Image (spheres, rainbow, N blue to C red):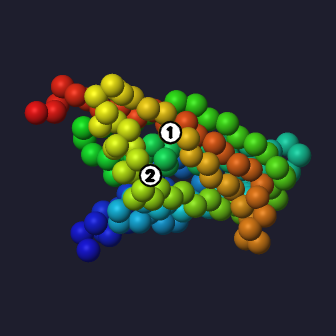
Amino acid sequence: MFDSLRARLYRIGFNLFPAYRGTGGRVTYIAPDWQEVRIKLPHTWRTRNYVGTTFGGSMYAATDPFYMMMLLKNLGDEFTVWDKEADIRFKKPGQETLYARFTISDEELAAVRAALADSETDSIDRHYTVDLVDAAGTVHATVRKTVYVTTDRSKRV
């Protein structure tokens, strides 16, 4: 129950935080275990570009922080996580509200931990993809994120 309340407070915090609020995006759901996050990006005067479609910068910025945050929340304090690179592919102009659903499975978290448990490996890059879709499920853009993960071995006993 406490985790559920905490996730709701994070959702509210994201939506009030000026840097995220400026994207035009809104967080609609954060799972208590941080393995799923959902957002929506309304098509409004604030997110519209010169030709009347959703601004590509808003599309990217609305999706930017979530894979990094999800890994930080799930891996724990002995890991350092940073966004390393990103790529966005525009497939169809957005003229309606767009949605994205971010997920990280238990298997992916175990794979990250296993890769970093190897004494030869100090860091890894992981690649994640999320689609911005309309209500009918049509993909308007695909964002690919590369996230850098490392362990802070000085904290280990």
Q: Residue at x 72, y 61 (%)?
A: 133
Q: Which mark is residue 93?
A: none
Q: Nearer the viewer, residue 119 or 149?
A: 119
Task: Where is residue 55? Give x, y as percent.
Answer: 75, 45
Q: Is residue 18 left or right of residue 116?
A: right
Q: Nearer the viewer, residue 51 or 6?
A: 6
What is the three-letter code of the residue carrying label 1?
A: Arg
Task: Where is residue 27? Give x, y as percent.
Answer: 52, 60
Q: Is residue 70 above or below residue 148?
A: below
Q: Quadrant of residue 138?
A: bottom right
Q: How many numbered marks does the figure carry?
A: 2
Is the residue marked by circle 1 packed among few (<14), some (14-19), or many (20+) residues within 10 Å?
some
Q: Which residue is mark 2?
A: 108
What is the three-letter code of the residue carrying label 2?
A: Glu
Q: Is residue 107 above or below residue 148?
A: below
Under tag 1, what secondary structure?
strand
Q: Which residue is mark 1?
A: 126
Under tag 2, what secondary structure?
helix
